[in-house]
Image: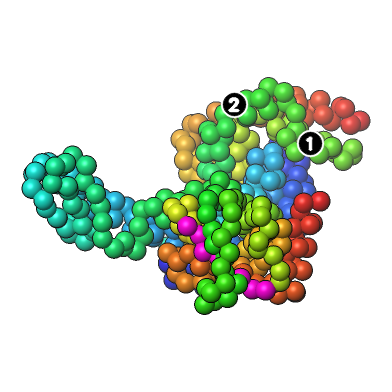
Amino acid sequence: MNGEVGLQGAPRDLYADCYSRLVGIVAVAAADRGTAEEVVQEAFLRLLPRWSQVSRYDDPEAWVRMVAFRLLSNRRRRAQNKIRALVRTGSPPNGRPPSGDRVDVTRALATLPLAQRQVIVLHHLLDLPLDQVATELGVAVGTVKSRLARGRAALEPLLREEANDHV
Amino acid sequence: MSELRDLLSAEAERQRPASTPPYDEIARRAHRRSRLRAAAAGSAVVAVVTLAAISSVLLTGSDDDQTRSGPAGPSVSTTPSGPSIPTISGPRTLGAPIEVRHVLRPPETCRATAARAFTSAAGNDCFELAAPEIVVRRVADLSVVEVASPDGTLQGDQAVWITLDGPDAAQLTALTADRWDGERVAFVVGGLVYDATIQGERLGHMLRLSRDPRTIERLLDVLTATSG
């Protein structure tokens, strides 16, 4: 066994500090909090044996987030049919009703492909520059730009429609 | 797009879970995974050595009675008249393939086919469980091993020891010892719930079951809460 697993205080502190925040962020991209919790936990599982290396990075949380987002992508590849069905129906995967006084951004996001949701969350929610988004997702900057443009274009009328519904 | 950012931030905040799972649970899972990987790596070495030894016998194709030893693995022998079907014998090494293969299987599918129960450690009071079916499954975070005993011989509140026979028993033991070390394991034998303590190393087949009232109460709480 790796002697560092679970024995140091630092990964424990990182976990306590950023677990729920990461779940919130990934949940927006995943459109499902259960999935978000699973991939974030899996990312932490992968962090612990590598802690001696990752702890030297400027932002270990970014590493966990990157792993979580990539795990999310891997899940999508394994469950293409399910994702297609969700996109086709446009129904919110977690089935939670909107609060009534706000635009249901989750419902709008759920109609987008996962790849577009990911770039929108990383760029617009976390303010990451395009090159960092590209690094985290393991794709080219041009790909990030095109996904972002398509995602925003698809999201804009949906959000406007949602807003009108709630007026 | 600042409006979008505000919406996303609000949604991310809303999606944050109210509580965080215990870090110790994450660390324990990472620990267990690390051990499984180490065991799998060990079994891969054994498998390669075994294959190399078998290939060596097949390629030489000698008709003579012979026994060959691999560099670090079990011995391989052939019968005098049949060089095409070698048999493997000798002591099993740490991380023997069968246990590791079973460890990697989902516990929900694990079944064993034979069991004997002893009501004393000396083994002088033995019950043979008739046609037992042993099913391992997860209930919430609790590992549950159910031993159906149709004849009802295994009853009462005394502590019992149980041994399991056959390759599936090795699978069950490997699962309980390797996957669930340090976790709660409930044994349900003949309809009674037992708290299980793994005895010995991963290759051992002995499980000590007890009926400590406080432990059983805790296990029953989990079982009844999740089954309802």
Residue A105 magenta-highlighted: no
Image location (x, y in percent) of residue B54: 20, 47
Image location (x, y in percent) of residue B165: 47, 57
Q: Residue at x 53, y 33 (%)?
A: A77
User: What residue span does the magenta drawing correspond to?
Assistant: B158-165
Q: Name the residue under label 2.
A: A81
The tag on residue A2 is none
Numbered disc 1: secondary structure:
loop
The quarter of the picture where residue B11 lies is: top right
Nearest the eye: B165 or B38? B165
Image location (x, y in percent) of residue B101: 42, 50
* Residue A49 visible to an observer of this rendering: no
Q: Residue furthest right?
A: A167
Numbered disc 2: secondary structure:
helix
Residue B159 magenta-highlighted: yes
Q: Residue at x 53, y 51 (%)?
A: B113
Image location (x, y in percent) of residue A61: 56, 57
* Residue B101 visible to an observer of this rendering: yes
Report, in whole angstroms, how far the alpha carbon at label 2 lies from the one at label 1: 19 Å
Q: Which chain is mark 1 on?
A: A
Q: Which residue is drawn at 52% across and 77% down?
A: B122
Q: Name the residue under label 1.
A: A95
Q: Residue at x 69, y 65 (%)?
A: B155
User: Answer yes or no: do the residues labelled 2 and 1 have beta carbons within 8 Å?
Assistant: no
